[in-house]
Amino acid sequence: MTIEEYILQHIDAEPEYLYRLYRATNIHLLHGRMASGHLQGRLLKMLVQMIRPKHILEVGTFSGYSALCMAEGLESDGHLYTFEINDEQEDFTRQWIEQSPVADKISFMIGDAITEAPQLDIMFDMAFIDGDKRTYRETYEAVLPIIRQGGFIIADNTLWDGHVIDSAYDRDQQTTGIREFNDHVASDNRVEKVILPLRDGLTLIRKI
């Protein structure tokens, strides 16, 4: 038994709908492991329950797994706005969101969150950044002004499978983007931040 298997046996079970979505993601989509999965999904739900946001912004919907997990944790008047820049993703993802038990709490949009999210004219309590790693810093700077004081940004994949400390990936644009983001956030005195070595790295950022 691996430590991950042990962990999964000792946390809340993965809801059946999400289990089916995760399987379908890995069967039908390239890079299926990009979906948050059981452990991270349960953490996202719990973070939402702790923060109790009214409005959540997600950058990078992919198959919708993380959106559904966060929407699970929302209170009755909460809402999540999720952006996916890849329009080829829409047919798969929209059906899974719209047929889910939390469909009424999610607005799924195809477009670039960097330019379109600020146009919603909403101050968000929480954001989950999981889009193009090459533009993580740009995404962060677009999102921070529309996060309320005391609100949170959660950034996924910030350890990037260990590539952030591996010189073999110095020319990889996605690794470079993550490194630049991590360095930028580390020196940003507008926020408090901590990196959790969960899965592929998860950075929790609180706007001061």
Image (spheres, helix red, strand yellow):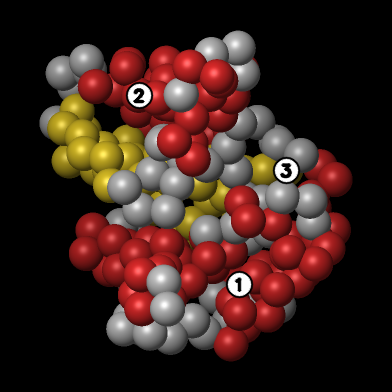
The quarter holding residue 112 reads top right
The quarter holding residue 22 reads bottom right
Query: Tags 2 and 3 in contact by the CB under 8 Å rule?
Result: no
Q: Earlier in the sequence, mark 2 or mark 3?
A: 3
* Circle 3: element type: strand
Q: Tag on residue 141?
A: none
Q: Amino acid at mark 3?
A: Ile
Task: Give the class, few, some or many, for how many residues have Cα within 10 Å of label 2's Cα (few <14, many ≥20).
Answer: many
* Circle 1: element type: helix
Residue 94 appears in view: no
**Image quadrant in which the C terminus is located:** top left
The quarter holding residue 146 reads top left
* Circle 2: element type: helix
Q: Earlier in the sequence, mark 1 or mark 2?
A: 1
Q: Amino acid at mark 2?
A: Asn
Cα–Cα span, label 1 and label 3:
16 Å
x, y percentage for residue 191? Answer: 19, 28
The correct choice, above or below, for 128 with respect to 54 in the image is above
Cα–Cα span, label 2 and label 3:
27 Å
Q: Residue furthest top?
A: 171
Q: Amino acid at mark 1?
A: Ala
x, y percentage for residue 80? Answer: 49, 57
Question: What residue appears at the point 27 percent right and 40 percent down from the top-left corner?
Answer: 195
Residue receiving disc 2:
182
Cα–Cα span, label 1 and label 2:
33 Å
Residue receiving disc 3:
110
Question: Is 62 situated left or right of 186 in this image?
Answer: right
Residue receiving disc 1:
103
x, y percentage for residue 37? Answer: 53, 65
Question: What residue appears at the point 28 percent right and 47 percent down from the top-left corner?
Answer: 196
